[in-house]
């Protein structure tokens, strides 16, 4: 199977395609409505579809991180999105990919890990699961996150809202050159929806911490277009599109965060970093339902 070959599964309602590079989804297609929900990675805007963020989420100060008193280099969002996974299971409605520690990963990250990525289709629902196993003999620190980008059928951000399951205090944690500045901005108080517009993204991603809602919806106010994401169990949420772009929106559940400006501590002191003891595993799942 060639590296660039697409691997597909489907239900009667939905068809998805993936590649081995990054175990990345490259298509979420409504069969009934003949509509592609996933952003198609136009390089002049954003050349990815749904990168998996591991073993870090976001950006590091000077692209460096301290593990066990040794400094390692990692680019934004980690290495998993650019590495080839192994396709370990394939069924009519389910795919499982695996990435294991290697000489390359050990040069950037000192832990013996195994990462499983599972995609399952149930009718009009896509379920995505990440399982992380610490195969080593020492405590392991990591973060993981999702970064799916959704194509907007009408390229006008002010025609879309993000709807929340519960009323929220929408306190945005601000970024400066990809790092958290420590400043916040209140963009809604006791509200159940956020009206999007291009100006919101002039300050990079919108980042919320510890929302009460277990699901969010991206909705077009003049049609039936709707992307509903279950984010229960994910403490952080990023909402992003490239500045001045109105053609796609990323909804990003995270288990981890970018560095704060000036952070120089060990990975164990980094906000949002998760811990796995030897031979332990953690599983994180989100799901997406589509309508148009």
Image (cartoon, rainbow, N blue to C red):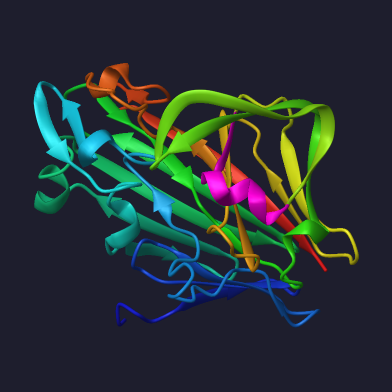
Q: Quadrant of residue 1?
A: bottom left
Query: Residue 256 location in percent, x, y?
Result: 43, 32
| Left or right: 139, with 227 as reference point | left
Would residue 136 be visible to someone looking at this image?
A: no
Residue at the (49%, 76%) spot, across then down? 42
In the picture, the quarter occupied by the C terminus is bottom right
Q: Position of residue 137 (x, y in %)?
A: 16, 25
- Residue at x 44%, y 79% (from the top left corner): 6
Horizontal and vertical percent position of residue 48 = 45, 66
Extent of the magenta region:
197-208
**Membership of 205 in magenta stretch:** yes
Q: Residue at x 38, y 31 (%)?
A: 281
When the figure is inspected, residue 69 is found, relative to residue 142, above or below; the finding is: above
What residue is at 10 percent from the left and 21 percent from the top? 69
Nearer to me, 77 or 263: 263
Is any atom of residue 177 visible in this view?
A: yes
190 and 120: which one is in front?
190
Label count reads 0
Position of 164 with respect to 262 (left or right) is right
Q: Position of residue 272 (x, y in %)?
A: 43, 25
Q: Is residue 61 left or right of residue 49?
A: left
């Amino acid at each position: 199977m060639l590296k660039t070959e697409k691997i597909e599964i489907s239900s009667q309602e939905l068809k998805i395609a993936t590649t081995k590079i990054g175990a990345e989804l490259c298509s979420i297609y409504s069969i009934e409505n003949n509509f592609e929900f996933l952003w198609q990675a136009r390089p002049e805007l954003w050349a990815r579809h749904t990168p998996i963020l591991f073993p870090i989420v976001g950006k590091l100060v000077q692209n460096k991180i301290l593990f066990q008193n040794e400094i390692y280099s990692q680019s934004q969002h980690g290495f998993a999105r650019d590495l080839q996974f192994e396709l370990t299971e394939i069924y009519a409605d389910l795919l499982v990919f695996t990435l294991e520690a290697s000489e390359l990963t050990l040069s950037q990250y000192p832990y013996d890990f195994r990462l499983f990525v599972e995609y399952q289709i149930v009718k009009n629902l896509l379920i995505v699961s990440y399982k992380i196993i610490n195969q080593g003999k020492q405590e392991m620190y990591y973060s993981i996150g999702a970064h799916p980008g959704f194509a907007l059928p009408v390229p006008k951000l002010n025609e879309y809202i993000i709807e929340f399951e519960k009323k929220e205090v929408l306190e945005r944690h601000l970024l400066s050159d990809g790092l958290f500045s420590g400043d916040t901005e209140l963009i809604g108080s006791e509200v159940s929806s956020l009206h999007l517009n291009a100006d919101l993204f002039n300050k990079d991603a919108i980042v919320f911490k510890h929302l009460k809602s277990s699901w969010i919806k991206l909705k077009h106010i003049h049609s039936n277009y709707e992307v509903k994401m279950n984010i229960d169990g994910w403490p952080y949420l990023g909402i992003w599109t490239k500045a001045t772009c109105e053609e796609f929106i990323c909804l990003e559940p995270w288990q981890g965060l970018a560095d704060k400006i000036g952070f120089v501590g060990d990975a164990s002191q980094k906000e949002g970093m998760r811990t796995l003891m030897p031979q332990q595993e953690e599983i994180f799942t989100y799901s997406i339902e589509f309508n148009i």
